[in-house]
Image: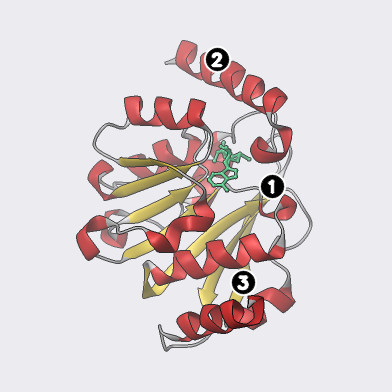
Amino acid sequence: MKQQRIAETFGFLRAWLKNPLRVAAVAPSGRALANLITCEISRETGPVIELGPGTGAFTRALIARGVREEDLTLIEFGSEFAAALHFHYPRARTLWMDAARLRTIDLFDGRLAGAVVSGLPVLSMPPRKVIAILTGAFRKMRPDGAFYQFTYGPRCPVPLRLLDHLGLQAERIGGTLVNLPPAAVYRIRRTHPNPFHLDRVSLRQRELAG
Ligand SMILES: C[S@@+](CC[C@H](N)C(=O)[O-])C[C@H]1O[C@@H](n2cnc3c(N)ncnc32)[C@H](O)[C@@H]1O
C-alpha cells in the first residue's frame, strides 16, 4: 500500500511536469483534505460524480465512507490518470474526458447524483469553462445535491458574480493546514429550488454566445 502511494506521488509529479496547468498541484491531496471534502457524503448520498480524481485520493475516501464503487463516475482528462483509475476501480465508471462536457453524457442509468466532488483546478480555468462544468454538474444532480470544491486560495475559487449568475451559493465547510499546500473546501448549492433554473441560465448563455 505504501509503495502504491509512493508510485502515485511520483506519477502525479511526472504528470504535473508534463502539464502543470491541467494538473495544478505537485502532489496528490493528503488524507486530511480527502476526509474533509468527503465529510458530508455517505452511502445514503447515492451516486457521486468525481471530477479530476487524479490518482484517486478522494475516490479512496468516498469508498471508505461507504459510497459503492458502482455509484461512482470518475471524470478525468489526463489519460495517465484515467487508465490507472479504471484499473484500480473497475466497478466505477471512469470516463476519460473534459469535465466541461458533463452535460452531454448519460450517467447512472438516468438516476441523479447526490453529490459532485471536484479536484479540478477551477482557478486556472476560463469562466466559460467553469460555467459549463457547474451547469453540467447541477443538471446531473438532485435538487438537494451539493458540489464540493477544494482550493488553495483564500476564498471560493468560483467568483461570487458567477455563482449569482448561475443561481448558486457557496459556503466554506472547513480548511486543513495538514496538506501541501494548506487547502479549504467549499460546498456549492442551488439558491433556487427550481431544478430547471440552471437549464434556463445555460440556454441564455448559449444565446449570448451566438
Ligand atoms: C489538482 S489535481 C487533483 C487530483 C486529485 N483530486 C487530488 O486531489 O489529489 C487536478 C486534476 O484534475 C484533472 N483535470 C484538469 N482539468 C480537467 C478537466 N477539464 N476535466 C477533467 N479532469 C481535469 C487533472 O488531470 C488532475 O487529475
Image vertical order of residue 23 relative to residue 62, above or below: above
Q: Which residue in the structure is indicated by mark 2?
A: 6
Mark 1: few, some, or many residues within 10 Å (few <14, many ≥20)? many
- Give the number of callouts: 3
Ranked by sequence position, the earlier of labels 1 and 2 is 2
Residue sitting at the far front: 210
Q: What residue is drawn where x is 50% and y is 45%?
A: 35
Q: What residue is drawn where x is 72% and y is 42%?
A: 182
Q: Find residue 170 and name its label.
A: 3
The answer to whether any part of residue 178 appears in the image is no
Between 188 and 122, the residue placed more toward the observer is 122
Element assignment for label 2:
helix
Q: Quadrant of residue 193?
A: bottom left
**Quadrant observed for ligand 1 in the rendered image:** top right
Element assignment for label 1:
strand
Spot occupied by residue 110 in the image (x, y as percentages of width and height): 23, 64
Type of amino acid at the residue the image marks with label 2: Ile
Q: CA distance from mark 1 to mark 2?
A: 21 Å
Spot occupied by residue 103 in the image (x, y as percentages of width and height): 43, 64
Q: Which residue in the structure is indicated by mark 1?
A: 183
Residue sitting at the far right: 154
Asked whether disc 3 touches disc 2, contact meaning CB atoms under 8 Å apart, the reply is no
Type of amino acid at the residue the image marks with label 3: Ala
* Quarter of the figure with the C terminus: bottom right
